[in-house]
Image (cartoon, rainbow, N blue to C red):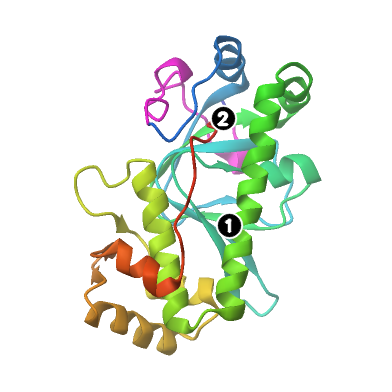
Amino acid sequence: MPGQNGRAFSSRQYPCEKCPLRPLPVFREFEKQELAFVSTFKKGELAVDKGATVLVEGNHSAHLYTVLSGWAFRYKLMSDGRRQILNYSMPGDLIGLQGSLMGEMQHSVEALSPMLLCVFEREYLPELYRNHPGLAYDITWIASREERMLDENLLSIGRRTALERAAYLIAFISSRARAVGLNGKTPVRIPITQQHIADTLGLSLVHTNKTIRKLIDRKLIVWRDGGCEVVDGERLQELARWEGLGEDRRPLI
């Protein structure tokens, strides 16, 4: 089945009824009729290579996606090539909703690692809103949650020091990753570079490197090939003056 940008959607490796994410305690249970609708809403799965662009700013998308596995980041580019990373996506996150509701994407999405995405067709959204108010509320909740994350990111850039910003970002990503089981029985390894951190926090790469070194010296994180691992999440949160995610069970479309 042809997909966006010429990609082919695969047959379902994971039927919705056997989704590996649904048993996780972070996600709410579906009603039987909701699960039946989402099962028909899903049109296939899309495998994405690390570094591939999933969605492009300014383009129209006929699809939206739920991350089944892997990591990605959302970003905007300025005309001179400078990049601002807005947020990070991981399993259970819905991406492409903005393009589905507003006509074209206002940001791009790039894969930080190999990914597997559940593919949904935009044209079925009206039926979701019309016949499944519980799922419609879920999409509203997801949009509101994204707004809350951006509020916290704005607080970081506006008021936190560089050290507090870095501590918050790493603690935030790590907490979200643990909630969706990305760590298993080992510490979460966040597959980002210091350039990603610089582009998220609005710092120069040199300043970012010095800031990360301070977190390493305090034994809060370690930096290995392939990313960052958190050693002491509680002290990272304290340093960032951040109270944590504070989320109950959340939707999974």
Q: Is residue 14 left or right of residue 56?
A: left
Element class at badge 1 = helix
- Looking at the picture, how far across and down is residue 119, in whole percent? 56, 31
Report the magenta stretch's main SS. loop
Quarter holding the C terminus is top right
Q: Nearer the viewer, residue 167 or 204?
A: 167
Q: Nearer the viewer, residue 198 or 48?
A: 198
Residue at left offset 66%, top offset 23%: 134
Q: Is residue 122 left or right of residue 173?
A: right
Which residue, given by chain and number where applicable, does mark 2 sit on?
253
Using the rendered view, name the quadrant where residue 33 is placed: top right
Q: Mark 1 belongs to which amino acid?
A: Met
Element class at badge 2 = loop
Residue 6: in magenta span: yes
Which residue, given by chain and number where applicable, does mark 1 sit on?
149
Indicate whether 215 appears above or below 74: below
- Looking at the picture, how far across and down is residue 150, in whole percent? 62, 61
Residue 82: in magenta span: no
Q: Could you tell me if the residues under marks 2 and 1 are in contact, i.e. CB atoms within 8 Å?
A: no
Residue at left offset 55%, top offset 10%: 32
Indicate whether 196 appears above or below 94: below
Stretch in magenta: 2-24
